[in-house]
Amino acid sequence: MDIKYVKHDEILYDLWDDTVIYSVNASVFGRTWFLDSAFPNWEAIIWEDYKAVMPVFVVDGKAVLPEWMPIMGIYFEETPKKESVHAMLKFLCEKFPRVNINLDKFSYFGDFGQGVFKKYSLYQFDTIKGVKKAVMETSPFVRRLMLQQTSEGFVFSKIPNVSLLEKFLKLNEVAEDKSIEKLCSIVEKGEENKSSFSFCLATRSDKLLGIVTAIYDDNYIYLPQLTVFLGVDVPSSQMIMLYHILTFFENSSAVLLIDPQRLKINEQLLQGMGGKKFEYTSFQTGIMAKLTNLFNFGRK
């Protein structure tokens, strides 16, 4: 098995994107435009002339997951097998003594004797059109919100440019400047590739209530940021924005992914809208993995 480590300027983008697009776990998070935005100068592990590829993000000698990227994958031309996935992960561990990444379900085939694997969840909506209909039919709370929206004249509209998005986020102290700049870079590159946008929710009197950003492809729609501003009814505004996102994507067959911890959304709201758990696997090596093992052993 020919596996090699490739520096950023040696990666062949066309071959890389072909592998990702046609892999069983094809994802916007593996596309070169997204990787360039999330982590310039990313590197890679490549198996046998791009039969399998894995992005690598190095910070202080540690392989990590960039901000605004919930999961990553090992992308194969053909259906991945346990032996191949483990070979790629072992190669990563031999190259970097410390690893802290989140793997999608096709990039995890169980423990292989190194590091610590733990299961976590996002929330997913599979059939968006059906979920939207079910929400309106079964939830008096959502129906009331929609009536309130109509009577008060709420406006949900696309933010026309990235500089305006950056201005809104900085004015409302959503995150540190570097974090906002990174998100805006992803949105800007995504707009060029028709794979991202940002919307704002406002009242008829132009009072800004919140902003939501979506990054998407044919397989996944991910909301890295949904911000409701201070002085606003947070649950109501969140629900209205989520409903509008469902409306925008109602004819899509992609899976909508939402991280309730990142977005600070009540999980009961997501469950009430028909969301279910989307599992991924956290993989750690190094001192943190050893401490986790010790802690778990002490709790048994």
Image (cartoon, rainbow, N blue to C red):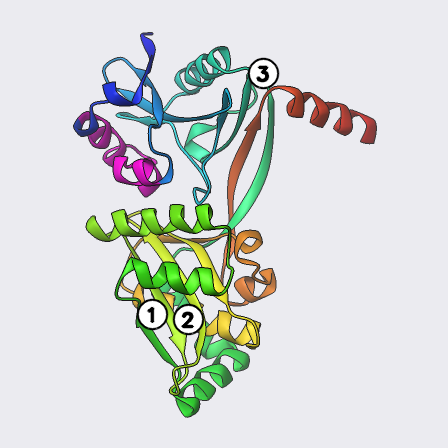
**In the image shown, does 7 or 19 lie closer to the viewer?**
7
Q: Give residue 68's quadrant in the image.
A: top left
Of callouts 2 and 3, which one flags the residue occurring earlier in the amino acid sequence? 3
Element type at mark 2: helix
Task: Determine crowd level at label 2: few under 14, some 14-19, many 20+ residues with C-alpha closer than 10 A.
Answer: some
Q: Position of residue 260 (x, y in %)?
A: 55, 55
**At 51% across and 68% down in the image, what residue appears?**
228
| Residue 242 to residue 213: above or below | below
Is residue 20 covered in magenta? yes
Q: Amino acid at mark 3?
A: Gln
In which quadrant is the C terminus drawn?
A: top right
The reply to whether residue 27 is visible in this rendering is no
Q: Position of residue 131 (x, y in %)?
A: 42, 66
- CB-based contact (under 8 Å), mark 2 and mark 1: yes
Element type at mark 1: helix
The residue that disc 2 covers is 243
Q: Amino acid at mark 2?
A: Tyr
Is residue 36 covered in magenta? yes
- In the shown orientation, is residue 236 left or right of residue 162? right
Task: Determine crowd level at label 3: few under 14, some 14-19, many 20+ residues with C-alpha closer than 10 A.
Answer: some
Magenta region, mostly helix, strand or loop? helix
| Residue 102 to residue 92: above or below | below
**At 54% across and 52% down in the image, what residue appears?**
262
Q: Position of residue 53 (x, y in %)?
A: 32, 23
As drawn, which residue projects farthest toward the bottom? Answer: 151
Which contiguous range is marked in magenta?
15-37
The residue that disc 3 covers is 114
The residue that disc 1 covers is 247
